[in-house]
Image: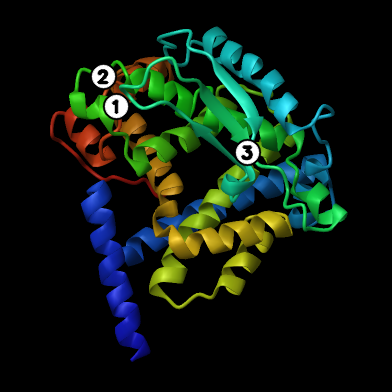
Amino acid sequence: EQDESFALGTELFGRMLWKTERVDTPLAELKTIGEADLARNLASMRTACDEFAPGLSLVDCAAKAKLDKPPEGPVEGAKRQLGLLRQFVVDNDLVTIPSDDPVTVDAAPPYNASNLAYISIPGPYEKKLPSVYYIAPPDPSWSREKQQRYLPGETDLLFVSLHEVWPGHFLNYLHARQSDSVYGRISVGYAFAEGWAHYTEEMMYNAGLGRGDPQMHIGQLTNALLRNVRYLSAIGLHTEGMTVEESERMFIEMGLQDPGNARQQAYRGTFDPAYLNYTMGKLMIKKLREDWTAERGGRKAWKAFHDEFLSYGGPPIPMVRDAMLGGTTGALFSLE
């Protein structure tokens, strides 16, 4: 009976990926891809921690990096970071910023504080409404120690701000609004939106953000590992019988999250099986960039790639791949 339940879960999970993202890669292969990316990021974290905090475990190293909190608090700290991030994008000519639309930062309201951060962006036909980047305060019922551990560190928050605004979700919105496609203007899919925002975190670090500082790299990797564990938890919870407690432990031990975030993330996986789209989308975009820029100048073609990719608005990434490569799709993913 349990085997039948797992088989049904696997079938339904596969249908979800095909119907929503046009991904038909077998689930076993997807899991192998996710495990490989987790291993890659853990190895990079070990290297960064050996420089930043020699002798500490990865869990303790990530916790130490997180002790360096924005002195003015996360909301005011994020406001400061956004200007720096936008200027970095401009100075390094990474992607076009097509308008000067503003974005504000605020604390998330209690009724929508189940995730550390998110951005609320007006719909395509809404006028004169603000885009707001929200940061959730810790649960007031938690102990003071748990609340302090939950608050993001400076570099952790920097990559969250990058993900939500520059050059992540907000910039995706600015491009989608100008897409030639009506569909592109009104609909941005899960893997495209979250894949792009997550992709930009590693892209910005590789473009020189932080100039190789190990603590900066830890901030980037902490966010990457969080998404790696979401990916594997989604598969585990919905197709393999993983418990919420096992997922929570994986967020702490391999995602290097504090207990508050780990609990939030494990429970999110029970109702959001598609939160594997952060890593899945990122890996598809990385592979598409690799293939598209191969004959267009490599690293020099990143801006052209980013502008072309964002011009489609946000359809399933395999469809964008077909359009950008003239129907020669090749592999969606690259096992590094």
Which residue carries the number 1 mark?
313
| Residue 157 seen in render | yes
Q: Quadrant of the N terminus?
A: bottom left
Closer to the camera: disc 3 or disc 1?
A: 3
Closer to the camera: disc 2 or disc 3?
A: 3
Distance in Å between CA atoms under marks 1 and 2: 6 Å
- Does residue 152 lie above or below 127 as drawn? below
Task: Report the disc number at residue 179.
Answer: 2
User: Which is nearer the eye, 180 or 136?
Assistant: 136
Q: Are marks 2 and 3 in contact (CB under 8 Å)?
A: no
Q: What's under tag 3, amino acid-wise?
A: Ala
| Residue 26 seen in render | no
Residue, x 42% and y 65% (percent of image)? 235
Q: Residue furthest bottom?
A: 1
Distance in Å between CA atoms under marks 3 and 1: 27 Å
User: Which is nearer the eye, 12 or 106?
Assistant: 106
Label 1 SS: loop
Q: Position of residue 12 (x, y in %)?
A: 27, 67
Q: What's under tag 2, amino acid-wise?
A: Ser
User: Which is nearer the eye, 296 or 81?
Assistant: 81
Residue, x 35% and y 79% (percent of image)? 6
Asked if residue 139 lies left or right of residue 98, the reply is right
Label 3 SS: loop
Task: Report the disc number at residue 108.
Answer: 3
Q: Position of residue 87 (x, y in %)?
A: 59, 11
Q: What's under tag 1, amino acid-wise?
A: Gly
- Does residue 114 lie above or below 204 as drawn? below
Nearer-N-terminus badge (2/3)? 3
Nearer-N-terminus badge (1/2)? 2
**Mark 2 closeness class: few <14, some 14–19, many ≥20 residues within 10 Å:** some
Q: Are marks 1 and 2 in contact (CB under 8 Å)?
A: yes
